[in-house]
Amino acid sequence: MFRLYVWMDGEGFDPVRFREAYGGEVSSRRRISDGLVKSAGQYWQSAELSGVPAARVEDELRGLLRRLEPALKTVSDAQGMRIVIEVVQEYRDSDSVAGLFLSAETLRIIAGMRASVDLDIVRDLS
């Protein structure tokens, strides 16, 4: 099964204002520096799609991106913005790991948003 979501941050980007306009949630990152936990800024995250079967990943991802596209285009050209599409595959055994195919249409949507894709494959420990 897969989980899909989008997050973003950037210089001068106000994730709270973006959430108020477009929904989603705001979280904070923390870093350890010199033995101290310090705030590393806030980021916006879309609602997460979870439990997506491998056969539906591209369709669900494309649907998520189309819903978010107008909102993300309002900030994608801003200096220092990072827009990241997270694709997380959870597996129970190595035989259940599936490949990921993205069509030219989906790649055009991603490129138009100036987004990056982060693909994580993690063991399901539940």
Image (spheres, grey):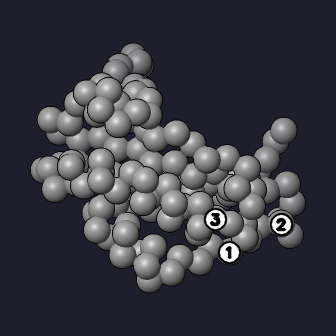
Give above or below for 36 relative to 19.
above
Q: CB atoms at circles 1 and 3 under 8 Å apart? A: no
Residue 85 higher or lower than 62, as above or below:
above
Quadrant where the C terminus sits is: top right
Give the crowd class for mark 3: few <14, some 14-19, many >=20 residues within 10 Å.
many
Tell me which residue sits at (24%, 55%) in the image: 73
User: Farthest residue toward the top?
Assistant: 36
Vertical placement of 124 versus 69: above or below?
above
Q: Amino acid at mark 1?
A: Gly
Which residue is tagged 1?
99
Determine whether, in the image, residue 120 is placed left or right of residue 104.
right
Give the amino acid type for the residue marked by disc 2 in the picture: Ser
Q: Quadrant of residue 21?
A: top left
Residue at 44 percent across and 83 percent down: it is 104
Q: Residue at x 13, y 50 (%)?
A: 79
Position of 98 with respect to 126 (left or right) is: left
Q: CA distance from mark 2 to mark 1?
A: 10 Å
Residue at which label 3 appears = 57
Give coordinates of residue 47: x percent, y percent.
52, 39
Residue 19 is situated, as x and y percent measured from the top left of the image, at 34, 30
As helix, strand or loop, the secondary structure at mark 2 comes to: helix
The numbered mark, 1 or 3, whose residue comes first in the sequence reads: 3
Q: Earlier in the sequence, mark 2 or mark 3?
A: 3
Labelled disc at residue 96: 2
C-alpha span from label 1 to label 3: 10 Å
Please indicate, yes or no, whether residue 12 appears anywhere in the rendered image.
yes
